[in-house]
Image (cartoon, grey):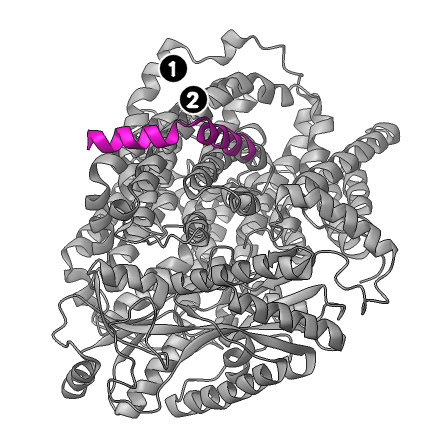
Amino acid sequence: MLENIILGFATAFTPENLFYCFIGVFLGTFIGVLPGLGSLAAISMLLPMSFYLEPTTALIMLAGIYYGGEYGGSIASILLNLPGTPSAAVTCLDGNPMAKQGRAGVALFITAIASFVGGSVGVVALMCFGPAIARIGLSFGAGDYFALMLLGLVAAVTVGGGSMLKSLIMVVLGLLLGTVGTDVTSGEFRYTFGFLELRDGVSLVAIAMGLFGVAEVISSVREASKRKIMEKVSMRSMLPTRDDMRKTFAPMARGSSIGGFLGALPGAGTVIASFLAYSTEVRLAKDKSRFGNGAMEGVAAPESANNAAAQTAFIPTLTIGIPGSATMSIMLGALMIHGITPGPLLVSDHPTIFWGLIASFWIGNFFLLVLNIPLIGLWVKVLQFPYKYIYPVVIALICIGVFSMRTSVFDVGLVVIFGGLGYLFQRVGYSAAPLILGFVLGPMLEENLRRAMLLARGDPYRLIADPLTGSILALSAFLLIWAAFSGVQNLLKARRITDMPAGEA
Amino acid sequence: MQAKFWKSMRRVVATSFIGGLALLGSAASVAQSWPERPVTLVVGFPPGGSTDVVARILAEHMSETLGQPVLVENRPGAGGTVGIAHVANADADGYTLGVSGVGASILLAAMDRDTGYDIDEQLDIVGVMGTLGLVIAGRNGLEAKTLKELIQHAAENPEDLAYGSSGVGTPGHLAMEYLLSIADVEMLHIPYQGNTPLMNDVLGGHVDVALLTTPGAAEQVRAGGIYPFAVSSPERSSLMPDVPTVIESGYEGFTATLWNLLVTPKGTPADVQTRLSDALNAAMQDEDVLTSYAEQGLAATLTTPEQAAEFLSTERTKWIGVIADAEVKKK
Amino acid sequence: MTIVSVRLVVAAILALIGIAAFIIGLGFEFGTARRMGPGYFPLVLSAILTILALCEIISSLLKPEVQHLDWRPLIAILSAVAAFAVTMHLFGMIPAFLAVIGLTTLSERNFGWLPALMLAATISLAAYLLFSRFLGMSLPLFQFGI
């Protein structure tokens, strides 16, 4: 074990590998900050660069790009409410309010720390329990995935600070949007209205940029032109206080464990992780109203969950050769181009690659911290420009970002629709984050339910009777009832208060 | 899903500069001097997939032969047809090539899906870029040890076994239906979205049988995670020399292979076609390419454009017959 | 404009989406619980969406509240994005950037044409350097027609 870790660090600590790790983190962050371009886009764009490198070096650089891209996405989410991925959408919930309150520096700092903590926990889990976690992942069948996704959706419904009805509507609308395109099981086109562009589904980036970015700009133009330009910020004011750190410690620990476990489940894990971590914090908090208004736990927990999951997502990829996400399959492809087919024997056949990669994961996380803390000041400066000059640039970047994802003018048109809808939703208190989760999980939810029912030969009892499926379903039911119950309780309490002094509501 | 501009950094600056000059110089007369600028090879799948790997192996060698870089551009979507539709509508100047697989060339059109192009009317075929077999593999714990035993079990216990494929109307699905119709037995079909989740479920024992592409499956077979019954190609796979073919297992006349064609827009000048064909065949005989092919379980092929067109028409007749036999629902 | 509450309008839009999706969904094969057809999920979801949206309509009628909309930025920015799509398609990246920035700046009454022009020029140049040069995207800078 220790031997292997030493081997890993010995492999990773060559000047060349360190250099490419650094380049990867740097470029990844840079691309990830651009609206619409997340870690997936960053890694796909820079993949060809890696073809000229040694396999280990290539993977180390790609891993660096991946973390950098994820972190860059958080920067854009916090500063400008521009999430490119579902997990970044969670970061927006409290990160952006923090930035509006002039605490962007603190939010970015906590994000960097939480990413590092989450990443480190993930790396340790990867080192110690890699194969074991991979086996747990394998034991998840279609029914279990269905149940797990349902749990994620329930978490999303209970996340929305406002009315549960509205969150529920958003989740269902997201699920429905997810059915647009080619049906996996039958190959039939649904809701494509004859558009070739809709056959692969609605573009997630177009939805996210419309609902978050465009809607945000429309509603802030008026206030922001009045808003005072932020005072010069000192480095001191950007650092979290000791109290802040104390308050975020437990959320980071909880987030890391949730993410570390879920990351190992191919496909759904990383997406659900941040939502579950966030809703756990909301559930545990005494004062739930702080969430959505710049609660630090709301940034720390999902960020650490996301990064822990990003690490453990490598477990199925490296130990059994099954990529957990689109990004992972690109990494697998990079290995295959170098003539290495990842599979269960990668660890024994190519120990230097496996352990070198794990060591470089940690180094990558460390670089991310070192590189980004000094840069926080620079990022925060973006917000010190008058908003007047920021928002036209944001809109232009959204346009080019969405367009370039699929070289599609059609997708830019979608941004118009979702931007308009998003503005209306925002005005009347619908949260867009549950919609994003519903949209991403929808196709997987449907596919797994249909497959589970096929495998159970159409018998729903056979599905529920499975111990794992049954217990996850029970957990979701419990969460939903609990949330509904406390919702009603709050409502009654509120009514009692407003009823007493007759008059204003 | 992802952006499609995967040019390497150092090539980028050069490319855009040279590209700009070439545009000014107009692309009217191409014949003699082709290629004057980098050639784009469009792949209808994301980077890192098996088609992408084939394209990159060949592009590297063809770049040397042609004296200009052959750049792989990924335009994924709709089972590879988005990329091929792009090629079909590109200028026939020899600077846009495409990699067209079984689905994009035959299956989708044969199932009446609208692909956005007609391969006979809009594309010229340069050659076959190698073939790849599928392996019929079972989860651990199945009693059957040969394909015959597996089929027999299915015959005695109808509906007991479920098999997974990488999607409705994919070669794996059709090949299995073809086999089942030859053997006159039934198994429940469970479609997955691609090889990855399918592999996960057969490793985890959630589905009994799966049709997998050889390179990924070979590693799992070596580690004992799944049990191989037979390979679908006419010859045994270089990756699993111990595994018999379906024909050897007693199902005469059954073959199913995945392949890719190198295509150009219809009307590409004849001498450009010839040079492309020569470059492709040169690559197919190169030591390094052959080594990479063997690692990926691919069989190299040497074809003239005429032979490739004939290959396409034979394959088309076969798959259309399979689709009709298996009564795969159209649309 | 202030007579109907925005909340009601949004709920009504959602209900309409649900109803439309349901009607279109009727055209897909429903299937059985064992072998669910492509229509199973869309129908169930659109039915749920419609019911939930109706609940929201009722609740917004019970408790009417008035929100106002900022029409100027709404129209300016949405048309800016739409203009980007059209100009990108017809004329290429640089004109598209000029169009999107130009229209976006109309969200404020007194943005001023000089700052708008300077912003547009700077952004076009920066975008060209960043996307075309550095990231190597093959985006047409200028073009004509389809």
Q: Residue at x 26, y 78 (%)?
A: B244
Residue B205 in magenta stretch:
no
- Residue A457 in percent (x, y) is at 22, 74
Whether residues under marks 1 and 2 lie with C-beta atoms below 8 angstroms apart, the answer is yes
Most common SS among magenta residues:
helix
Q: Earlier in the sequence, mark 1 or mark 2?
A: 2
Disc 1 is placed on an element classified as helix
> Which residue in the structure is indicated by mark 2?
A110
**Front position in the image: A256 or B63:** B63
Quadrant housing residue A221:
top right
Q: Magenta residues, as a range? A: A1-27
Q: Return the chain for callout 1.
A: A
Instruction: Please name the amino acid that badge 2 sits on.
Output: Ile
Compared with A285, B226 (above or below) is below
- The reply to whether residue A179 is visible in this rendering is yes
Q: Return the chain for callout 2.
A: A
Instruction: Please name the amino acid that badge 1 sits on.
Output: Asp
Left or right: A394, with C93 as reference point: left
